[in-house]
Amino acid sequence: MMNRKVSASIIFASMAAFAVLVIAPLPAVATEQAQQRREARDVRQDTRQGSREAKRDCRAADQKNNAECRQDKRSSKQDGRQRARDIKY
């Protein structure tokens, strides 16, 4: 009877130690992911602003028609979204 209590307490202690070891790294991973999301968001926001300015400059300079300027803006934003994905994943 005594051996069962000892072995049960050893098993419980082992499981508790294992749980602590498994759960301990999770906050660090979450913090790293949050930082990556922030960096990706900053890239997207900078890309949006840069795309707006490029479209304004394109239209002001009459280099291209409005549709071509709009397409350039779209492709610029798509490149920014891809850079953000590369940061996150």
Image: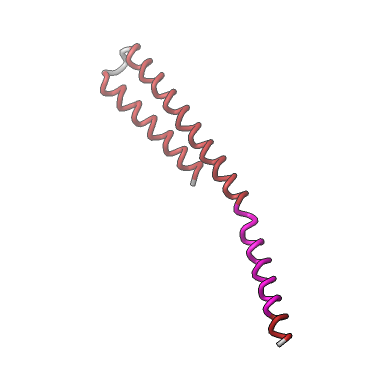
Please tell me how many numbered marks the rendered image carries.
Answer: 0
Closer-to-camera residue (46/2):
2
Q: Is residue 22 magenta?
A: yes
Q: Is residue 64 magenta?
A: no
Which residue is at the far bottom?
Answer: 1
Where residue 11 sits, quadrant-wise, is: bottom right
Residue that appears at 34% across and 30% down: 74
> On screen, 42 above or below 62?
below
Q: How is the image coloured?
A: secondary structure
Which residue is at the far front?
Answer: 1
Residue 58 coordinates in the image, percent (x, y): 35, 17
Residue that appears at 66% across and 67% down: 16
Residue 76 coordinates in the image, percent (x, y): 39, 29
Dominant secondary structure of the magenta stretch? helix
Residue 15 coordinates in the image, percent (x, y): 64, 70
> On screen, 26 above or below 36?
below
Closer-to-camera residue (9/21):
9
Q: For this view, does 64 lie left or right of residue 15?
A: left
Q: For this view, does 61 lie left or right of residue 5?
A: left
Residue that appears at 35% across and 26% down: 73
Closer-to-camera residue (8/19):
8
Residue 1 coordinates in the image, percent (x, y): 70, 88
Read off the magenta span.
Answer: 8-26
Residue that appears at 41% across and 19% down: 53
Q: For this view, does 53 lie left or right of residue 22?
A: left
Q: For this view, does 3 lie left or right of residue 44?
A: right
Where residue 17 sits, quadrant-wise, is: bottom right
> On screen, 32 above or below 58?
below
